Image: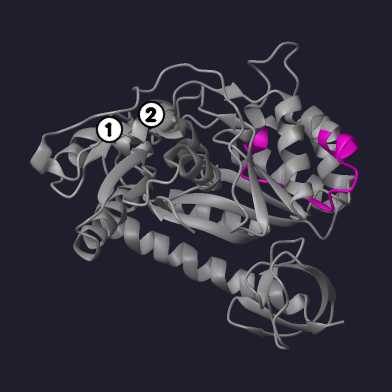
Amino acid sequence: MSGAEIVSFGCRLNIAEGEAIRQAAGDADDLIIFNTCAVTAEAERQARQAIRKSARAHPEKRIIVTGCGAEISRGTYEAMPEVSGVVGNLGKGDASSFSSFPRRRESGWAESGSRLRGSDVTPALSGLDHARAFVEVQNGCDHDCTFCVTTLARGPSRSVPAGGVIDAIKEVLARGQQEAVLTAVDLTSYGADLPGQPTLGLLVERILKAVPDLPRLRLSSLDCIEIDERLFDLIAHEPRLMPHLHLSLQSGDDMILKRMKRRHSRTDAVSLIQRLKAARPELTIGADLIAGFPTEDDAMFANTLALLDDADIVLTHIFPYSPRPGTAAARMPQVAHLVAKDRAAQLREKAEARQAAWLETLIGSVQPVLIENRQSGHAPNFAKVRMESPAAPRGTLLPLRITGRNGQTLLGAPA
């Protein structure tokens, strides 16, 4: 494929926006555009490392940096001699943002793309290089969690009107993709800024009604305290809505949750999951968890470790806390970095054991698997499955009988 090379880090929303960046950059095959993440210091370190490696491998190309890292650490990227220019988050979908940069710094510094500000949103949609289509429905965040730079990087919450989302999902179906994933920064805040304040549950209802031939609809990360009864009922009973929830829980200790300025308690999270699992037993729970948040002591960490069992969590994104510039948590008494790393390792060890035990329960079952890279894909519950038999075309929905497990991947054969 000719045109700019896009390298996206981080969340599904960034992946969806990567396609918008590709279209905006057009036929500029001398460009490498890094769509960065700022959620952790490690994410930014990896981006800088990749930029330097790319510059060594392709000295003839211009390197542009955009995304959340470009908003939070703009000066850092501007100072890198490998970088030709920096584009703000709002400029990343604008063709004019990528047209005026010099080859490298020899021609003088150039800057394009507006700094972040309020704006109407049109949905970003990932390309055909993904079997699952990521569809942007919301961007930005109005909350003020003390550890998070999202409000600095992406600004206030703004939602895509339902008509635009439905049109994007119809496009997904028309091009042969069989699963759409609703992506956002704060998905459960969807609609609060739109006329009539439609909820995420109402959006899901409208999608399922307007696109009846869509086999699979999946939700990205949710805030558990914002799952209202309409959305609860859909998650519990709608077969086309995949039985897999990823919750932004962050901690299992109430004091740490308060210091994070999260809006749920430990009891809120556990109670919701118990109710959902009672209504739909096959539902899989994933969670984001942070280890070593400022002021976290051993007892507080033990509450998070126990949350894996209490909330039946089998899929995780676990991070050792890293202070982010401009956040309140960065000014709190810090836990030693090595302690945070050790606690994250303990969480991962227990989470991996729980995941392995869950996967064992699926052996012998038949799972409809969406093939994503010729021989592997995901079941509705988001278990990763690899075929033992010859490859199938990407995007195929194939019933596989689960025959065993290799690490955290199930093995299957056509049923």
In which quadrant of the rendered view does residue 170 lie?
top right
- Taking the spot 54% from the left edge, 23% from the top edge, the residue there is 157
Instruction: Pinpoint residue 71: horizontal percent, then vertical percent.
Output: 32, 32
x and y, in percent, of residue 297 in the image: 37, 49
Q: Nearer the viewer, residue 184 or 315?
A: 184
In this rendering, is residue 69 above or below 6? above
On screen, residue 84 versus residue 205, left or right, reads left
Neighbour tally class for label 2: few under 14, some 14-19, many 20 plus, Cα within 10 Å: few
Question: Would residue 311 be seen by someone viewing this image from the given angle?
Answer: no
Residue 335 image offset from top left, x and y in percent: 28, 48
Residue neighbourhood size for the residue with mark 1, other residues' Cα within 10 Å, grouped as few (<14), some (14–19), many (≥20): few
Q: Quadrant of residue 364?
A: bottom right
Q: Is residue 311 left or right of residue 278?
A: left
In the foreground, 28 or 77: 28
Report the magenta residues as a range: 207-225
Q: Height in image: 51 above or below 357? A: above
Residue ID at (60%, 30%)? 138
Quarter of the image containing the C terminus? Answer: bottom right
Q: Secondary structure at mark 2?
A: helix
Q: Nearer the viewer, residue 264 or 300?
A: 264
> Which label was assigned to residue 319?
none
Q: Which residue is mark 1?
A: 100
Q: Is residue 266 visible?
A: yes
Q: Nearer the viewer, residue 247 or 102?
A: 102
Residue with the mark numbered 2 = 96
Q: Give the residue type at disc 2.
A: Ser
